[in-house]
């Protein structure tokens, strides 16, 4: 099944959006749509044939297993995000679906040819790589220095930004794709602290929980203030 660019929900925000219609059509001929269920792996550390992909819907985690067999979540991938290690002979980390996820996948060789053929795509992928690096550095700084409340508020802020259809404001509601254990893992907290801080954010009026994982931003400005984020920190999806 070839990709259907005209109906793709991230066609205006993914890296391929910089291509002309003709160039995008040529690229899409090499692509395939793949759906992952929660917990299903896109590729594993050590794979030498790992594909490259743009996330169309859902959420992914990039993780590693330490010497004690414990998982460490290193990064999250939101819709329009690009995943794949173009200049490495094998994958260094596991990439796993957090929710049912749809991806537009390409063989590494096809993306390498596209980069050579379309300089605008190369620049777009470089920009995304820089944004991913900044996000990783921000997460490291956050978990090293910030209070638990700030860490959690910042994570919720970033999920609301990723769920928004606009780069100008946060989504009013979204589903949190991480379990409390995964949130604790990522932020360097205990599950008990995550649960307590979620309750505190709700008591303060910043959020309201809806069902098992639904989050409503009842006071986006308060959440943003608590997170330490600024208005220009809202990423372009």
Image: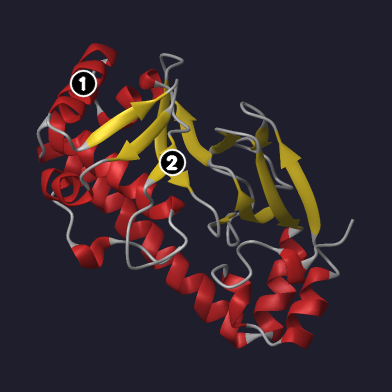
Q: Is residue 51 in view?
A: no
In the rendered image, which residue does mark 2 sit on?
174
User: Which of 75/229 is in front?
Assistant: 229
In the rendered image, which residue does mark 1 sit on?
199
Residue 102 versus residue 177 in the image, above or below: below
Quadrant of residue 96 within the rendered picture: top right
Numbered badge on residue 55: none
Q: Is residue 2 in view?
A: yes
Neighbor class of circle 1 (other Cα within 10 Å; few <14, some 14-19, many 20+) is: some
State how the image is colored: secondary structure
The residue shown at (21%, 21%) is: 199
Report the residue that reaches farthest toward the right.
1
Image coordinates of residue 89 in percent, x first then y, are 64, 52
Taking 115 as reference, is 29 left or right?
right
| CA distance for labels 2 and 1 | 17 Å
The residue shown at (45%, 51%) is: 163
Element carrying mark 1 = helix
Taking 109 as reference, is 236 left or right?
left
Neighbor class of circle 2 (other Cα within 10 Å; few <14, some 14-19, many 20+) is: many
Q: Earlier along the polypeptide chain: callout 2 or callout 1?
A: 2
């Amino acid at each position: 099944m070839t990709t259907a660019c005209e109906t793709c929900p991230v066609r205006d925000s993914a890296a391929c959006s910089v291509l002309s219609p003709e160039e995008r059509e040529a690229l899409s001929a090499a692509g395939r749509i793949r759906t992952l269920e929660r917990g299903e792996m896109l590729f594993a550390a050590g794979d030498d044939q790992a594909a490259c992909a743009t996330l169309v819907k859902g959420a992914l985690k990039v993780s590693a297993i330490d010497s004690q067999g414990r998982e460490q979540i290193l990064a999250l991938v939101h819709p329009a995000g690009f995943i794949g290690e173009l200049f490495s002979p094998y994958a260094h980390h596991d990439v796993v679906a957090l929710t049912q996820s749809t991806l537009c996948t390409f063989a590494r060789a096809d993306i390498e040819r596209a980069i050579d053929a379309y300089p605008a795509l190369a620049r777009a992928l470089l920009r995304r790589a820089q944004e991913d690096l900044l996000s990783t550095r921000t997460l490291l700084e956050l978990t090293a220095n910030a209070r638990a409340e700030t860490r959690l508020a910042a994570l919720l802020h970033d999920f609301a930004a990723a769920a928004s259809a606009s780069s100008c404001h946060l989504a009013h509601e979204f589903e949190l794709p991480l379990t409390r254990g995964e949130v604790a893992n990522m932020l360097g907290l205990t599950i008990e602290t995550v649960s307590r801080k979620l309750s505190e954010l709700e008591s303060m009026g910043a959020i309201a929980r809806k069902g098992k994982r639904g989050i409503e931003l009842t006071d986006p400005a308060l959440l943003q203030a608590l997170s330490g984020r600024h208005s220009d920190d809202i990423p372009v999806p």
